[in-house]
Image (cartoon, grey):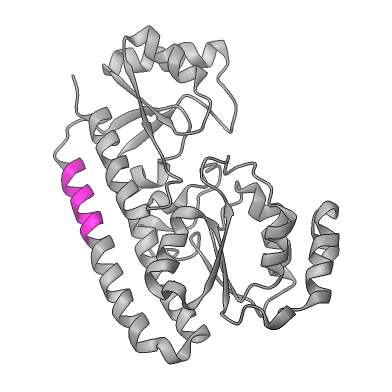
Amino acid sequence: MLRALDPRLRLAVACALLLGSGAAGGEQRPRVVVSVAPMAQLVERLAGDAVALEVLVPRGADVESYSPTPQQMVTLARADLVFAVGHPAFLLERRQLDPWLATHPEVARVLLSEVLKKSEAGGAPAAGDHDPHLWVSPRRMRAAAGELAAALVRLLPDAGVALEARRRSLDAEIAALDAELGRRFAALSRRSFLIHHPALGHLARDYGLEQVAIEHEGKEPSPAGLARTIAWARAEGIRVVLVQRGQPARGARIVAGELGATTLEMDPLDPDWLAAMRRIGDALAAALDHG
């Protein structure tokens, strides 16, 4: 297992394994590790304080490039359940989490990339899809909540009745969010929006929208690429450019300046996922409902 990890993290993980999970009469609750803060809200809503919860990527970090701390890898080494994105463009998972999971088949896991595979409309990421922000899809998160609840019942068999009640309540809230966003976007004639960092592709997919990104694969556009984007946006009458909180947005500022447009910030890493999705819906509606 240790050979699969970044060499800089091996010592910390080895120490955790030597110390064991019961140091000083320590934590007895099942340990759940999630990739990003928005996904943690599902665990919190379902299990409350019955589990010990660790979030690997803090708010404001770059999802595609963040590296876990040694202490986080210590926590991962003791995990009972992992709730992960499962997208190949998520480097933290690909380099650290996936190798560990491959050597620990006994650890329960729920992957956002897997939960809608049976649905053609929301299946696994397509080839060439470089957007790991699967949690911005309400439909994917709703399906994940059901699988997550089942996994938590296996960890907390005495809490099965309470977990089921919480699952039904959470499912109703996400269903209401999905319906609300669906009605809102269906009422708008414009279907394409401009964004700097391509973080809303899976949300767009849920509601028949088209995301056009200024940045591609983590890189600012070339002058020629920027010119093409500006020409498209001008032809479309784009007046709002969406930017992600905490991300550099030089390209967005250039494009907005050329178009006489405004930039509007949204935060897909907000830990209050339900509220954040409504705020993202507000920003996206503003980007679509103009001209």
93 lies left or right of 199:
right
In x, y percent, where is residue 98?
68, 61
Q: Residue furthest bottom?
A: 158
Q: Is residue 274 above or below residue 3?
A: above
Count of residue discs: 0
In x, y percent, where is residue 147?
43, 74
Q: Residue at x 34, y 17 (%)?
A: 233
Magenta stretch, overall SS: helix
Residue 239 within the segment the image draws in magenta: no
195 lies left or right of 100:
left
Q: Is residue 272 above or below residue 157?
A: above
Q: Which residues are magenta?
A: 176-185
Q: Residue at x 66, y 79 (%)?
A: 26
Q: Quadrant of residue 82?
A: bottom right
In x, y percent, where is residue 200?
40, 40
Quadrant where the N terminus sits is bottom right
Q: Residue at x 24, y 55 (%)?
A: 177
Q: Is residue 90 above or below residue 215?
A: below
Q: Residue furthest front?
A: 24
Question: Depth check: 286 or 227 in front?
Answer: 286
Quadrant where the C terminus sits is top left
197 lies left or right of 167:
right
Q: Is residue 118 visible?
A: no
Q: Residue at x 25, y 55 (%)?
A: 178
